[in-house]
Amino acid sequence: MAEPHGIPPAVWYKRMASLVQAAPAEVDADIIPNQFIVQLKPGIPASAILEHHQVVWELHSRGLSQRDGVFSGLEKIFSAGDFNAYAGTFDSATIAEIAALPEVLRVEPERWVHPAALVTQTDVEWHLGSISHRAENSTEYIYDDSAAEGTYAYVVDSGIRLSHEEFEGRASVGYNAVNEFENVDRTGHGTHVASILAGKTYGVAKKATVIDVKVFHWGSVCPRE
């Protein structure tokens, strides 16, 4: 049997079988057990795709004789230009064999997708209202509840007052380019910019982490390097 990406089939079996096992709720509760999306490599001719589907059906049928029939096999086929994929329900042994076929690009577990929950902040400044509303002078800011958590904004400015309550502990030191001075914000400009980016009250991305890159001190100029 071919070795996709130089990985022996036995290793593929082990990896793919682990995907089928029910994931602990605290790790990924959205994975749907035994359901997979299989993407084929680009550039495969239509005849080879049909042959692949036939091989998948044969692998699935062979496994049915050893099971109770709860796995339906290939269910949906997707094709758009050079993109070819399909979704189906397979046991761990069958999906491992499918993953090892040379024409397969990747196999991913199917998962539930949830619409983003929206949060509405009222009595906001104009810059927030204009982001989420077409009409002028809105006093509401509507954003998804992730609020950019897990993303980073690098503030290249006069420094950031890291202890400011607006940042809720989400601001940290990145780099001080004017190392002859202490890493504090003497002008307040960097802190102001950072609060517009990620402050809890005035920020656009209210849960993002801001990284302080200090390039200015009292003056308003700095060398480009």
Image (cartoon, helix red, strand yellow):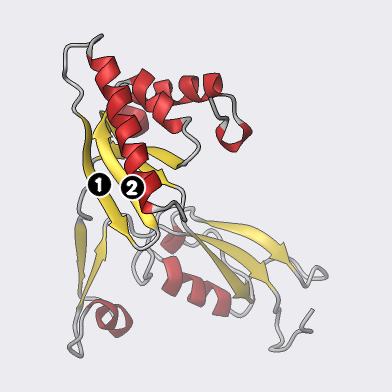
Q: Which x, y percent locates residue 96?
A: 42, 25
* Residue 84 located left or right of residue 119: right
Q: Are marks 2 and 1 in contact (CB under 8 Å)?
A: yes
Identify the residue under disc 2. Answer: 85
Which quarter of the figure is the C terminus placed in? bottom right
Query: Which amino acid type corresponds to the residue marked 1 in the rendered image?
Result: Ile
* Residue 208 located left or right of residue 127: right
- Residue 23 visible in the picture: no
Residue lying at the far right of the rendered structure? 180
Disc 1 is placed on an element classified as strand
Q: Which x, y percent locates residue 214?
A: 68, 71
Q: CA distance from mark 2 to mark 1?
A: 6 Å
Q: Which x, y percent locates residue 50?
A: 32, 43
The residue located at (26%, 60%) in the rendering is: 144
- Residue 92 visible in the picture: yes
Disc 2 is placed on an element classified as strand
Query: Which amino acid type corresponds to the residue marked 2 in the rendered image?
Result: Ala
Residue situated in front as seen by the camera: 1 or 161: 1
Q: Which x, y percent locates residue 4?
A: 55, 35
The residue located at (80%, 68%) in the rendering is: 179
Residue situated in front as seen by the camera: 202 or 71: 71
Q: Is residue 62 above or below residue 108?
A: above
Quarter of the image holding residue 125?
Answer: bottom left
Residue lying at the far front of the rendered structure? 47
Specify which label sits upstream in the sequence, 2 or 1: 1
Give the mark count: 2
Identify the residue under disc 1. Answer: 77
